[in-house]
Amino acid sequence: MFKPYTTAVVFVITAVPSLLQLAISGLEPALMRNPAAIAEGEWWRLGTALVVQDGGVLGTLFNLVCLAVLGYFAERAFGPARWLALYAAGAVAGEAAGYLLNDPGAGNSIAVCGLAGGLAVAACDRLGRALGAYYALVLGASLVMGLGTWGVIVMVAVAVAGSQLVGKRERLPLWLFAAVAVPAAGVLAALADLHGVALLSGIVAGWISKGTSLSTSRSTKPA
């Protein structure tokens, strides 16, 4: 039976401070990404910002659930080393963009974007690809949540489309999952949303990982 040890360890490291911050009001400000503080030498915030959340209770729960689910499928698809590479790709790209754009904040969602991007383009199983694409789709649709009725309509449409993407994954061509994730990531990045940069980083890392895996398997085949 597959045991996602890497996902479990990262989940605990993330969940403990993320839940503690709900009771300790000063924890998030002390650990969040603060470009001004980072410029003054508090560089460690680029890492600690990943273990606290700025989305309140619902945002915290959403990020932790996504880490558990996408982390499980990513570790099953790629193994611990590539899991960490994808997670780091999203985290580094997202935190760097946040610093350069002077965007303070916190949350592990940018690191999860690395996993989602990799899954959407390189997972061996269709469920993993579908979940990665669905996550990218939801992030893209979240941009319209503040538009009142129209925002609700768009989110409902995305939920329906996403359920079809996952539910009918066996009937869909593999390229479709990447075709959903890449434009969503591109739109987010163009609008200076850190999740777009992180998704694109995960997508690129996933493609590289896939190419490396194929090259390795070919080189190990007997002549």
Image (cartoon, rainbow, N blue to C red):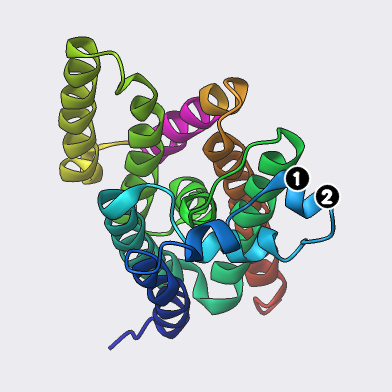
* Residue 4, image x, y percentages: 38, 81
Q: Residue at x 17, y 40 (%)?
A: 168
Q: Are marks 1 and 2 in contact (CB under 8 Å)?
A: yes
Work out how far the residue at label 1 is from the one at label 2, CA to CA, in angstroms: 5 Å
Residue drawn 45% across the image and 50% down it: 116
- Image quadrant in which you'd find residue 177: top left
Q: Which residues are magenta?
A: 173-185
Provide residue 222's location: percent of width, then percent of height: 67, 79
Residues 217 and 77: in front is 77
Q: Main secondary structure of the magenta part?
A: helix
Percent position of residue 181, x then y? 45, 35
Q: In the image, which disc is placed on residue 39?
A: 2
Residue tagged 1: 36
Point out the image quarter for the C terminus: bottom right
**Quick one: SS at disc 1?**
helix
Q: What residue is at 33 percent from the left and 84 percent from the top? A: 2
